[in-house]
Amino acid sequence: MAESRLNKRKPVIKGYEKILEDDYVEAVQEGESIYGLCEIEGIRYPYQEDVLICSSQTVAELPGFSDENIRLIFAETFAELQKKWGAADYMGATCCSVTAWKNNNQITIWTANLGDSAAFLIVFDKNGKFREAKQLTELHDLASEAELNRFKQLNIKHKIRDRSGKIRNVPLNDYIQLTGRLPTGINVSRGFGDIDSEEYGFSHKPDIVKHEFNLNKGDKAFVIAACDGLTEEILPTAADIARVVSKHQNKPLEEIAEALVNAAFNEGSNIKDDNGETRWDCSTDNISTGIFIPGEQAASITVLDGHGGCYKGYNLKFMNYNAGKLTKNIAMAFYPALDVKIKMLTAIANLLMRMNAIRDSLPKKKDIDNLIRQIEVILNSDAPIISKFLSSMQTIDDAYMKEQKSYTRPSFRRKKNVLDFINKLDNADPKFQYARILKELKAIFPDAANRPLPRPVKPPQKAKREEKKPSRQKKK
């Protein structure tokens, strides 16, 4: 399923004269899915970065998984990316990933988000009239009641200096309501990076939510992912976004994305501060928007928005690694990390499917039934995906080695070796049908037969206390 990039060009934004190198409008096609992408940097710091990525091939198998396993796939992907690329102070990135597919007249959408980037569903009826507009994600910013309640439960105190010069501890919630930010300066409560904010309750745990929506015949649905440059005080609600999309709903997707960015930039130009000047964080912010129409093939868009990295005197410290590089690293690794976990669970599912298919052909079903139960227990456990994968490999390998050892056990008639056992399998001896099937099952896992399998680590045993022998005192 090759990805093809179509119609990439510079955006045409009314009043936006500073077209930068990274500004673009683009249509991307992968399989049956087409994505419309548009991004402008605006007037912002060059070390901050937005990234839009999309994929259909990676998520193609997701509709076949249980809800629990889909949540596990996204949760472990976010945790892995934070561990590998997010260990940085005073810089980070928000992220919103939205995956959707259509089955008959029902749309299934999965969102996984950190921070204030957001996803939306916009639906029009067969006559092009507005039917539904829904924001699919809860924002993780310091205006969110849910996040403020989470901070309140943490019961964190922060030291401040009052007007008299005295230092006193105040609840973190009071500080947030007074300043609108965490003590480290950021105004989001979750994201990648920003490990210096962890002591104040900053979290790397995403919200992973499933949404289902029933369509009427002829309805047209659009799924949108965007950074806060599109939504924050500019097109703040799903209805505002739907108003723009409705005017361009019959145009190519990349032009709809461009229209959203255009509207956000120009709406932001009308927002003034207390001095009557244009707010710098509105029309001048980076704006990134991706859009697609859900089909039978699963499709996915992810937007990441970098922030921080070069303030509070840390310019020299982060000259070689800034928020832009952190964001790009996470973006490059996002779908590959997701793909590995999906392939591992797919291998286990294929294993179970194959075992159930061949069960009826075996004269003795006790061994294969026992093996199926073991694999099902592993698949439905709460263990990490890599542990499920390795445990399934180990279970099949142990069953195969058991058959091999049973054959090669010395007997009084003649000595048997492994080579004889392998020859029996290759010659299709009916007595070795179960062992032959185990050999086939081993091949389902990549390189399972060619690399050593990890054994479970035994917990350390407590050292035995040596009894002290009574010392013999020398006689004087």
Image (spheres, grey):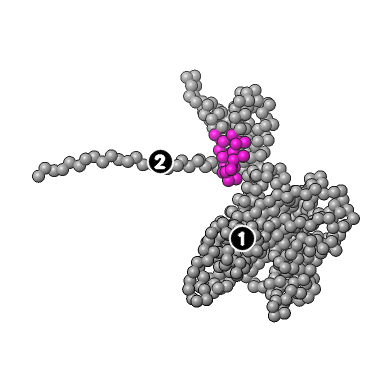
Q: Is residue 366 left or right of residue 106?
A: left
Q: Which label's residue is closer to the chain start, 1 or 2?
A: 1
Q: Position of residue 81 (x, y in %)?
A: 60, 56
Q: Position of residue 113 (x, y in %)?
A: 66, 56
Q: Quadrant of residue 235?
A: bottom right
Q: Quadrant of residue 468?
A: top left
Label 2: which residue? 461
Mark 1: which secondary structure?
helix
Mark 2: which secondary structure?
loop
Number of marks: 2
Task: Tell me the tag on residue 59.
Answer: none
The residue depicted at 52 percent of the width and 26 percent of the height is 406
- Asked whether residue 10 appears in the rendered view, the answer is no
- The amino acid pointed to by label 2 is Gln
3, above or below 421, in the image: below
Count neighbours of disc 2 (C-alpha within 10 A) and say few if under 14, some if 14 to 19, many if 20 or more.
few
- The amino acid pointed to by label 1 is Leu
- Asked whether residue 193 appears in the rendered view, the answer is yes
Q: Which residue lies most toward the top here?
A: 413
Q: Quadrant of residue 426?
A: top right
The residue depicted at 65 percent of the width and 41 percent of the height is 347
Q: Is residue 103 left or right of residue 436?
A: right
Asked whether residue 131 is drawn in magenta, I would say no
The residue depicted at 64 percent of the width and 51 percent of the height is 74
Q: Which is more toward the observer, 13 or 154?
A: 154
Q: Which residues are magenta?
A: 374-398
Count neighbours of disc 1 (C-alpha within 10 A) and say few if under 14, some if 14 to 19, many if 20 or more.
some
The residue depicted at 60 percent of the width and 69 percent of the height is 178
Label 1: which residue? 148
Q: Which residue lies most toward the right here?
A: 127
Q: Which residue lies most toward the front here?
A: 164
